[in-house]
Image: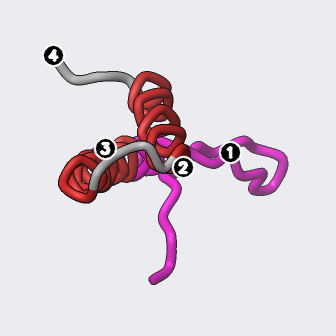
Amino acid sequence: MNKTFEENMENLEKIVEDLEKGDLNLDDSVTKFEEGIKISKECNKILEKAERKITILLNENGEIKEENFTTEE
């Protein structure tokens, strides 16, 4: 089951705490770092999906029109 954005962020914060403590050996640090990168990518996917769902309400001649939000790249 996929984790929520909030759950992923909690896990990522825990990894950062573990790395900042400096108690891990090099192999464990690299493993934690790789896990953090995977979680970060998953969070990014969740945010991109949410962004595609955002809609903007526009006022055209006194009428409210709903339009999909798009970003210029």
Disc with the residue nearer the chain's start (1 vs 3): 3
Mark sitting on residue 1:
4
Which residue is drawn at the image coordinates 71% and 52% (left, top)? 58
Disc with the residue nearer the chain's start (3 vs 4): 4
Amino acid bearing label 2 = Glu
Tag 3 residue: 39
Amino acid bearing label 1 = Leu
Mark sitting on residue 57:
1
Disc 3 from disc 4: Cα separation: 14 Å
Disc with the residue nearer the chain's start (2 vs 1): 2
Query: Contact (CB < 8 A) between labels 1 and 4?
Result: no
**Front position among marks 3 and 4:** 3
Q: Determine whether 72 is above or below 62 in the image.
A: below
Q: How far across and how far down the image is residue 44, in percent?
A: 38, 52
Residue neighbourhood size for the residue with mark 3, other residues' Cα within 10 Å, grouped as few (<14), some (14–19), many (≥20): many
Q: How far across and how far down the image is residue 65, in percent?
A: 63, 45
Disc with the residue nearer the chain's start (3 vs 2): 2
- Give the residues drawn in magenta, as a range: 47-73
Disc 4 from disc 2: Cα separation: 29 Å
Q: How far across and how far down the image is residue 51, in percent?
A: 47, 49
Answer whether residue 13 is magenta in the image: no
Image quadrant occupied by the N terminus: top left
Tag 2 residue: 20
Asked whether, in this view, residue 2 is left or right of residue 73, the answer is left
Disc with the residue nearer the chain's start (1 vs 4): 4
Query: Contact (CB < 8 A) between labels 2 and 1?
Result: no
Asked whether, in this view, residue 61 is left or right of residue 42, the answer is right
Amino acid bearing label 3 = Ile
Disc 3 from disc 2: Cα separation: 17 Å
Residue neighbourhood size for the residue with mark 4, other residues' Cα within 10 Å, grouped as few (<14), some (14–19), many (≥20): few
Residue toward you, 10 or 71? 10
Disc with the residue nearer the chain's start (4 vs 2): 4
